[in-house]
Image (cartoon, rainbow, N blue to C red):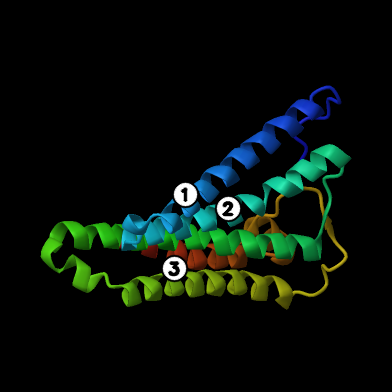
């Protein structure tokens, strides 16, 4: 959707979103660089933090560049295939954020409740496994949404008038009744929203 149709406001919006995007990406890259360059930071907490920074870079890069291009070119239309691609990456990185925050909470739980066994419990193999599980669960959620959206093939020529494609937008296009849409949204939300919340 358009943020503003005022032509005098377009350069200000462009500069504002571009600067916020660059600051966010640069900040997360600095976190990754600091963790990877300092041997004292090669612990489980900082491994998770650098992976969270990487997921945040991907998360913001799924939306903001498309919005910046839309502001610059005055085009807010996204194809259905482009929307599915954007939604897929958005869901991967959003779910990865949630899963990594849950893993970080578990890491802090072990550090506080079992400080003498912390190094044994949170060994590098377990940390790598937890990051891999977070990625695989994120891919699974993304593919669930894509399978549901691709099951209905008669919307391939649709253009969506928005710079960002939300899963609920795609479900509104493909579901004729609100009951099916609500069942899908609540099921996926319960699995990927309530489960990390419960673990936290």
Is 29 placed left or right of 69 in the picture? left
Q: Residue at x 19, y 66 (%)?
A: 118
Residue 15 point in image, percent of width and height: 73, 31
User: Quadrant location of residue 6?
Assistant: top right
Label 2 belongs to which residue?
57
State which quarter of the image contains the C terminus: bottom left
Residue 78 point in image, percent of width and height: 81, 54
Q: Residue furthest top?
A: 8
Label 1, secondary structure: give it.
helix
**8 versus 134 height, above or below:** above
Q: Residue at x 59, y 69 (%)?
A: 142
User: Quadrant location of residue 180?
Assistant: bottom right
Q: CA distance from mark 3 to mark 2?
A: 24 Å
Q: Residue at x 57, y 64 (%)?
A: 92
State which quarter of the image contains the N terminus: top right
Neighbours of disc 1 within 10 Å: few (<14), some (14-19), many (20+): some
Mark sitting earlier along the chain (3/2)? 2
Foreground label between 3 and 2: 2
Mark sitting earlier along the chain (2/1)? 1
Label 1 belongs to which residue?
31
């Amino acid at each position: 959707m358009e943020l503003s149709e005022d032509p005098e406001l377009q350069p200000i919006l462009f500069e504002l979103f571009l600067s916020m995007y660059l600051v966010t990406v640069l900040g997360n890259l600095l976190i990754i660089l600091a963790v990877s360059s300092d041997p004292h930071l090669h612990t489980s907490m900082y491994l998770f933090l650098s992976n969270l920074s990487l997921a945040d870079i991907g998360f913001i890069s799924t939306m903001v560049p498309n919005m910046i291009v839309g502001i610059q070119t005055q085009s807010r239309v996204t194809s259905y295939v482009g929307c599915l691609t954007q939604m897929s990456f958005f869901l991967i990185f959003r779910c990865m954020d949630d899963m990594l925050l849950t893993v970080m909470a578990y890491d802090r739980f072990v550090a506080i409740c079992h400080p003498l066994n912390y190094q044994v419990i949170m060994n590098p193999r377990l940390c790598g496994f937890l990051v891999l599980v977070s990625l695989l669960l994120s891919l699974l959620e993304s593919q669930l949404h894509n399978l549901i959206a691709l099951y209905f093939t008669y919307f391939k020529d649709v253009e969506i008038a928005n710079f960002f494609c939300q899963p609920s937008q795609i479900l509104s296009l493909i579901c004729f009744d609100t009951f099916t849409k609500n069942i899908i949204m609540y099921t996926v939300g319960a699995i990927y929203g309530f489960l990390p919340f419960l673990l936290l």
